[in-house]
Image (tube, rainbow, N blue to C red):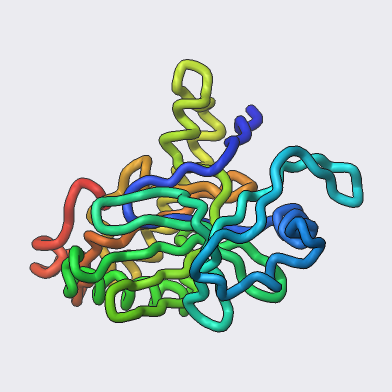
């Protein structure tokens, strides 16, 4: 069967985001502000409201798209701007759309309020994401960089436009996937989980909302807020204490 395409972006929990397709990059490059300038000319405007565009537009090849709405841009580093477009929200954080300066690549920025979050859990999550990014795996969300201010922690992650696995199930006929498609997803998710276990990481919160899809429908494991690192073999006592029914 042919997997049903996922429309839009839906993010829940504390994590967000995935991959940029060539068409996504082309769309970002084509978006201009009302003054005709590239959006990068408005970077750094923490106060006030940047220009907006609405309605349909088209790329040079005639493909129609709806431009993003730009509010104030908040520069977290010299490389990224954070828009006020919210992709998701959790108890201690929110996920916002970001742009890489220069090529306008879209990223997902998880903004965490440090005063409300568990410091040890934050440290563990960042360390795990950095290690996973070093190894890289097509079925695990990629962290580009992490930054912090006195009050906030910013995790810059790859942007996923395919939504969650839960969204895919809801949009499917009778909330079911055909056997071939389900098998493909399970194999890829298991591959990502195997990579985590090889690195001594137990996710502990694997669920439909924590599996996101890129524009091609490739599933990626995300949200490592409850993950634990284990030493020794999977049969050791440290693994026994950390293991859960959720990966």
191 up-or-down from 215: above or below:
below
Q: Is residue 245 left or right of residue 193?
A: left
Quick one: 18 or 60, which is closer to the camera?
60
| Foreground pick, 155 / 196 | 155
Q: Is residue 50 above or below residue 168?
A: below
**Residue 188 visible:** no
**Is any atom of residue 177 visible in this view?**
yes
Which quadrant, please, contains the N terminus? Answer: top right
The percent coordinates of residue 233 (x first, y second) are 21, 71
Question: Residue reaching furthest top?
Answer: 174
x, y (%) of residue 25? Answer: 72, 60
Write the residue at 52% across / 24% down.
172
Vertical arrangement, residue 152 with respect to residue 5, above or below? below
Instruction: Name which residue lies at 41% across and 48% down.
Output: 88
Residue 130 placed where, x, y %? 40, 77
Coordinates of residue 28 in the picture (x, y in percent):
72, 58
Q: Describe residue 51's horizontal placement relative to residue 37 as left or right.
A: left
Left or right: 62 with respect to 185?
right
Tell me the residue at 35%/49% (across/down). Answer: 89
Identify the residue at horizontal 17%, vertical 57% (top origin). Answer: 243
């Amino acid at each position: 069967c042919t997997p049903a395409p996922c429309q839009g972006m839906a993010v829940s929990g504390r994590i967000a985001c995935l991959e940029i397709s060539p068409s996504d990059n082309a769309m970002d490059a084509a978006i201009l502000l009302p003054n005709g300038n590239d959006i990068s000319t408005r970077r750094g405007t923490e106060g006030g409201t940047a220009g907006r565009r609405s309605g349909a537009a088209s790329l040079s090849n005639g493909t129609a798209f709806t431009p993003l709405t730009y509010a104030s841009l908040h520069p977290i580093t010299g490389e990224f701007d954070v828009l006020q477009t919210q992709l998701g929200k959790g108890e201690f954080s929110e996920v916002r759309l970001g742009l890489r300066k220069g090529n306008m690549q879209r990223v997902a920025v998880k903004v965490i309020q440090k005063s409300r979050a568990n410091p040890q859990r934050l440290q563990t999550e960042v360390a795990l994401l950095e290690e996973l990014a070093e190894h890289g795996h097509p079925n695990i969300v990629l962290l580009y960089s992490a930054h912090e201010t006195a009050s906030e922690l910013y995790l810059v992650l790859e942007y996923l436009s395919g939504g969650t696995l839960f969204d895919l199930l809801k949009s499917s006929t009778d909330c079911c996937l055909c056997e071939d498609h389900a098998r493909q997803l399970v194999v890829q998710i298991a591959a990502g989980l195997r990579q985590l276990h090889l690195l001594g990481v137990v996710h502990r919160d694997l669920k439909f909302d924590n599996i996101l899809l890129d524009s091609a429908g490739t599933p990626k494991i995300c949200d490592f807020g409850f993950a634990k690192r284990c030493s020794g073999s999977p049969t050791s006592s440290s693994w026994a204490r950390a293991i859960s029914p959720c990966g």
